[in-house]
Image: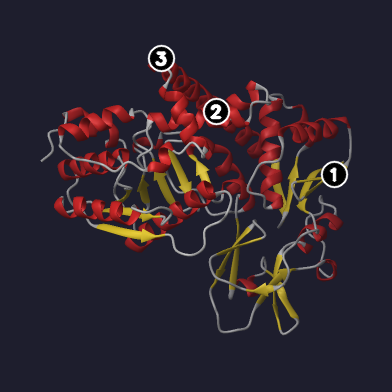
Amino acid sequence: MLDIEPDLSTSLFSHIDFTSGAVAAVSGGSDSTALLLLLKHHLDRTAPATKLLAVTIDHGLRPGSAAEAQGVAKLCAARAIPHRILTWSGPKPPTGLPAAARETRYRLLAEAAQAEGIGLILTGHTADDQAETVLMRHARDDGREFAEMAGRGLAGMAPATLYDWREWIVRPLLGTRRSALRDFLRREHVGWADDPTNVDEAFERPRVRAALAGESADSMEGTLVLAGQAAAERRQLGAGAADFIHRFGSQPAIGLIRLDPRLLSAGEERAAVYALRILLATTGGIAFLPDQARSEALFGKLKAGFLCATLSRTVVDSRRAGIFLRREMRGLPAAAAVIDDTLWDGRRHITLNDSSGALLIAPFGAAAAKRLAPGEEKTPPSLMRAALAAEPALWQAGDCLGFLGESRALKAVEARPVVAPFARFLPSFDLAPARAVAGLIGAAPVPSLPFSGHSAG
């Protein structure tokens, strides 16, 4: 049994729901090693039947990584903790290596969780990591107005992030300093591995880490306070955007979003522009929100009168009947075989229910859309058909079986809408607007937060 202060593991984990078990991401470094031991202590004391799996990702990027993974395996064996080592195989990109490694790491962790029926992944990100993240984002967006950054970028890492709309990634150590975790490990006579890339200033984060090391404790505390304030502003901004989406958004046809023009004069313009940015990215199937300045300019033009414009692969058509958003026809995917559990055009999650036929998925097309009967009377038929033309349809032997909003097509393939900017990573800061858009377009509901009372962000 560890000699742990009674309140430490309680304060870190008591608010987390471990009903579905937990995957702990353990690299062998001090932060993740402390996370694992503290988590094991907490579960042994409060819920000993909980399934716990430690997972180490060996990226294979440097000598010694395999030995470090084996070191974690030995630690887990000594503590009776199930453990798996997963390796990043295949070629590595010549540029953008940290981002690619991060994406691979989360994918492998999620696969391990799914294999065990676990919906919760814990990582060892600390207060030090949070401060580094905030400073990195501040440096990248140095040319922006602070007011814009304070609402989103400076919030840092969220306490929880939904990955692929399925697994929750939880960061219980964000309020804990690395030095405190290392003090804990020393008291327990537990060692850790030091990754040399953490001090390789060829990469951005080690450069920021080195700069922070020369600052006072008050300086880091100030950065963390700033992050907390920005997180609160981001949640508030998202709540305002969600309210506007609920009040002024509708979907008169598949692939077509209508905004009530009253949105333009409803006040809180910053939240209204944010709502517009999320809807533009969702309609266009883009993982990133459109540029703030261009979105503000578009909003201003909408206030000035009717127009037709394109931003983020989305056609914005303002008429007396409303402001309509639909996917532009340019750049749609070519016909391809239907593959289960894939994302089509960034907008639809494809599920293959019947693989017996040689099915292709391709845009419905303008010619097929013109043959459809008009829909809702208040919506111009030309807009509805233009939206449907960009929707996915099933094809077999050169014949169109119908677009995937029709019941007969759904028997073989399902194409569920996704909230594109949050489809891969949904920070808990942004739950309100994500839920609002999911409800609007018929996406799968957002899974509940794995926290007592569902209060986080």
Side (left or right) of 456 relative to 84: right
Residue closest to the eye, 375 or 73: 73
- Identify the residue shown where x is 71% and y is 58%: 254
Task: Point out which mark residue 88 bears.
Answer: none
Point out the frontmost of discs 3 and 2. Answer: 3
Name the spot of residue 401 as percent of width and height, x first. 71, 77
- Element on which disc 2 rests: helix
- Identify the residue shown where x is 81% and y is 71%: 368
Which residue in the structure is indicated by mark 1?
309
Instruction: Name the amino acid, label 2.
Output: Leu
Task: Point out which mark residue 154 bears.
Answer: 2
Q: How packed is label 2: few (under 14 Cα within 10 Å), some, or many (20 or more)?
A: many
Residue closest to the eye, 64 or 11: 64
Q: Earlier in the sequence, mark 1 or mark 2?
A: 2
Point out the frontmost of discs 1 and 3. Answer: 3
- Element on which disc 3 rests: helix
Instruction: Name the amino acid, label 1.
Output: Ala
Point out the frontmost of discs 1 and 2. Answer: 2
Which residue in the structure is indicated by mark 3?
218
Rendering quarter of residue 114: bottom left
Q: In 3D space, how far apart are the residues under numbered discs 1 and 2 (Cα atoms)?
A: 31 Å
Q: Earlier in the sequence, mark 1 or mark 3?
A: 3
Name the spot of residue 100 as percent of width and height, x first. 52, 52
Number of numbered markers: 3
- Element on which disc 1 rests: strand
